[in-house]
Image: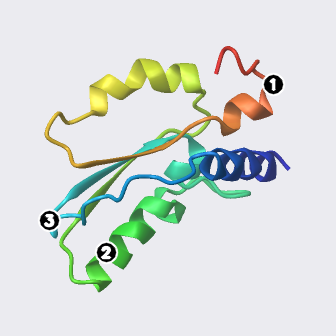
Amino acid sequence: MRIFRALLVACAALAACGDAAKLAPLAPDAVVLAFGDSITFGTGDDTTRAELGYPPRLEALLVQRGRSAVVINAGVPGETTMEGVSRINSVLDPGGEVLLLMEGTNDIGNRVPIETV
């Protein structure tokens, strides 16, 4: 149920974005940093395996489309948004091209006030 709520919040946030600016195509050799919580890492219902997360699947899709992009899985199971804020600077690459950010599911599950998130 927690994941459903998190996905619902994520969909609502995306819908609120409205008309977003067009992004430039991803460079063929881009490095993508996937930063977030257990959803990024790949925690399943009864497993904790990084190969289950979306980063390796995204990388495989990019390779299928002729790109040599690398997707770095910087997901941490159980991480809250506040913990992510304290960790993000240690993994950011100033020359990086793309950051995928997925935080908040553990905050929702732990009933952290939205003001804190």
- What is the x, y in percent for residue 117? 64, 22
- Which residue in the protein does label 2 denote? 62
Q: In this view, does 20 lie to the left or right of 63?
A: right
Graded by Cα atoms within 10 Å as few (under 14), some (14 to 19) or many (20 or more), the crowding at tag 1 reads few
The span from disc 1 to disc 2 (Cα, nearest Å) is 36 Å
Q: What residue type is labelled 3?
A: Asp
User: Badges 2 and 3: C-beta atoms under 8 Å apart?
Assistant: no
Q: What's the residue at 34%, 68% (across, down)?
A: 59
N-terminal of the two: label 1 or label 3? 3
The vertical placement of 89 against 32, above or below, is above
Q: What's the residue at 31%, 24% (across, down)?
A: 89
- What is the x, y in percent for residue 4? 79, 53
- Which residue in the protein does label 1 denote? 111
The span from disc 1 to disc 3 (Cα, nearest Å) is 40 Å
Q: What residue type is labelled 2?
A: Leu
- What is the x, y in percent for residue 49? 53, 57
N-terminal of the two: label 2 or label 3? 3
Q: Name the foreground residue: 42 vs 113.
A: 113
**In the rendering, which numbered label is found on residue 29?**
3
